[in-house]
Structure formats: C-alpha cells, structure tokens
Image: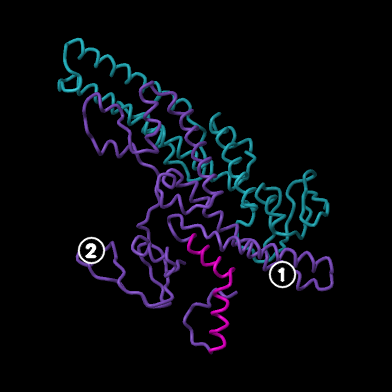
Chain colours: A cyan, B purple
Amino acid sequence: MYGRKACQLVKEFASGEKDQLTPFNNDLFDQVISECSQHHHELQSLIRKMQEEGLDVQTARNADHYGALIHLFSIVRNKRCLTAYVYNRTETIRNLLWKIGPVIPKEIEEKLNHWEEEYFKKHSAALRDYMSKALVDLTVDMVPPKDPYIQVRVLEDIREGIVLSDNKNPNFARHSMHFLKRTDAEKYISRGLMEELAG
Amino acid sequence: MASRSVETEPSTQAEDDYNAMLSTTDVELLKRAWRNEKAAPEILPFQSDLIARVREQIELMEETVEEKSTLGTDPLSVSLYQMDLDRTLFLLRSYLRIRILKIEKYMFHIQKTDELWNRLSKDEKFFTERCSDDLKKHLEESVLSKLPENYQSRERQSIISEEDDMRLDIFKFDLPELKSICNRVPEPRLDTFVLCRSKDYLTGIQLGDGPVDDRSKLFEMEAGVLYFICYKSIKPLVESGKIELL
C-alpha cells in the first residue's frame, strides 16, 4: 500500500524511547525514496497520457486525473514523513550534545548516518561560537550549586588534558578520591570519568 | 536567600524595607527573569541591560575573590564570596541556556515571527541563523536532494515557509488542509498552564479558555496569591512585568 513504509519509519522513531537514538534506518529510508521516484514516474506517465488524449490537464476530471492525484499526494506524504524522521532525529542529536558534550562516543556514532555526524559537528561548532561570544560556558553548571566544592571518585585514569582553575596538577588515578571545585569536576562527570560521591 | 521576600507574611517595617531593597538588586531581578524564562513556553525579551550589569558584577566579584584568596587571611569569607559568585554564575548560565534551548527547538518559528525575532540578543540572532542554516542544509542533503526533481526546489521550503504549492497548480487544485499539513514548523504551545503570582491586585484579565459562557467574565488576581492559569491569557502581563511566573 502506498505510504505504508514512510509511516513505518515515523512509527519506528515514535516508538523509540525519548532521547534514545536508534540506528538510522537506511534500508527503509531508501525504500521510501525509491517509492517516491516510482510515484513520480507514474504521475508523469499519467499526465503524458492525458495530454496525448488531447485533454486539458488542468481541468479534466477523469480517472487518470484522480490516479495522478493519488501519486502526487503519496509523494507529498512520503516527503513529510521522511522530513519528520530526519528532523526529529536532529532534535535528539541536539539534546545529546547537551548531555555528552561535543565528542561523540563510538557507540552513538554508529547510529548516526554521515549527514547526521556532519550536522552534529556543525551544530556543536555553532554552539561553541555562541558561547565564546557570550563569554560563558553553558555546558557546566547544569544543576544549581549547593556547595562550591564536591567530593568525587575517579572512575578511569585521567592522564592528559587536566585543566583545573587553580592551576594545580593532581594525580587523577583510578579510584582515587578528590575534593574539587564543582565547575572543574563537572566536565569529567558528564564524560563518565568521575562520579560524585553523595553526601 | 531572599526567594521568599515577596510573600505577604506579617512582618515589621524594617523587614519590609530590607525585603524591598533585596527584591530590586540585580541578582534578584536576574532570578525573576530566569524564573519567567524557565516557566514561559515561548522565548521572552532578552534582558540586555540587566545581563550587562550582572556581568559587570560577576567580574567585580571575581576580582574580590581573587584578591582575598591571594591574601589568604580569611579562607571562610573567600569561600562565602565564591559561593555567592557561583550562584550568580549559575543563574546567568542557566538563563542563557534556557534561551538557547528554546531557540534550538523553535528556530524556524522564531525566525519568521518578527515579534519573537526582535526579542533575541545579537549573539542569539546570529546563533539562530547559523542553526537554521545548518538544519536546512542537513534536511536538504539527507532528504530533499534524493526526491524526484520537481519536489526539491519549492518543497525544500515546505518546512519553513507558507508558500508551498506542491505543484498543485498543475491541477488547479486548492486544498488548504493539505497545504497546512506540509507547512508545520514546531511552535511553542501558548495554551499550556503556568503557575504565576502578581505583586499587585490586577483586574480585567480576559480568560481565553474554559466554557464559552465563562469567557466574557473577567478574571481578577489578588496580590501575592498563586494562580494556575493558561499562559495565553496572561501573556501581555508577563511581558510587561506585572505578573511573574514560577
């Protein structure tokens, strides 16, 4: 039936968990695209047929006219479904950017298609650009601060790129515990390298 | 903190004065702007003067903390200053962040609505443009360029503009409902309910919802009392600062 595959695609997204990305369904996506080409082809041949019969395409109301309409509407509908699928995925991608920062982990990268990766990069660049203009880093301070310092435990060895606001160079060995400035610790916590100790 | 200062509890004159002073500090104003922004479904006007002042104050506070911590004589007051600074910074960041999140969500709608567009700061405008260009390009590359030729050029705009004739002109067909399906851009829902409070007694609020015969009645708000109300009907009052959201 016309339009069913596009509907499946949208349903697949809708039934997925919110903020969870499923792998891009290239297979189904391409099938819908080719369905569109097929519709287009048949639409063209119907119009040609009407023209050959000497009918005015704009005013004639015969079976071919309505047949052509069905094809036209199918394309429009499919297009709408495809855009919805892609658009809603970008929304999830943008939310991910806030949660995990500008580096895509491997397991998520596999779920994105080529353009989505590009988009992710571009969007995170746009965000970075805004933050550097506004002179504030919006990715820290996600929860209201209670205390300027928090107790954290290091979950994985962090050897490189340690930047703390007091310019000290601590040894973040695995399982070691530290008392850090919350703003310093947050970026490690969001990357899963540290955890905050309750209390 | 003075978050409860506006509530009408019995208090002495001195306390009232103190509360009145607190509620007009920039941090308090920022807190109000932040609360409003957080609760409102649509983007509110950017508080450019306030934000500029708050930035200056943050710089001053940073200097104070710096100065005091190099002296190293009074670690307790340093950490108090630091905490105050962190809280103000959080408010500022969160305020800007909420706005950016709204922009990300409703970029096309904001872009085509002048009223909303003018509420953005210069940097936000730039960000919005860049964002929507990126998204348009992404949609074009991954969907539209793969569709049959005739459906790309005009239809590309179908998610962002009103004029999408979808080649219906071949058939001289006018199907408004079909056009409207194809022109949906995500818009904020203004008919959601919000918690709000007024500082003064307000009257003559027209409620746009509820049963039809109730609509003509005007609603009044007591000062300091919490109401749960449809955002649409108090929208102008939020914009003029008469009502604050929670």
Please say if A48 is above or below A135: above
Relative to residue A20, is residue B4 depicted above or below?
below
Q: Position of residue B110 (x, y in %)?
A: 43, 47
User: Badges 1 and 2: C-beta atoms under 8 Å apart?
Assistant: no
Residue B24 painted magenta: yes
Q: Which residue is mark 1?
A: B81
Q: Is residue B211 left or right of residue A146?
A: left
Q: Could you tell me residue B68's position as x and y percent?
A: 79, 69
Furthest residue toward top: A52
Helix, strand, or loop for circle 2? loop
Asked where in the image residue A178 lies, by quadrant, the reply is: bottom right
- At label 2, the amino acid type is Pro
Residue at the (63%, 35%) spot, across then down: A106
Q: Nearer the viewer, residue A39 or A153?
A: A39
Q: Main secondary structure of the magenta part?
A: helix
Which residue is outermost to the bottom? B12
Residue B223 to residue A106: above or below: below
Exactly how many numbered labels are in the figure?
2
Tell me which chain the residue with mark 1 is part of: B
Q: Are marks 1 and 2 on the same chain?
A: yes
Numbered disc 2: what chain? B
The residue drawn where x is 74% and y is 69% is B79
Whole-percent x and y of residue A146? Answer: 65, 66
Read off the magenta span: B13-37
Q: Nearer the viewer, residue B63 or B35?
A: B63
Q: Nearer the viewer, residue A176 or B124?
A: B124
Q: Quadrant of residue A37?
A: top left
Q: Which label sits in the foreground, 1 or 2?
A: 1
Report the residue marked by disc 2: B211
Q: Quadrant of the N terminus of chain A?
A: top left
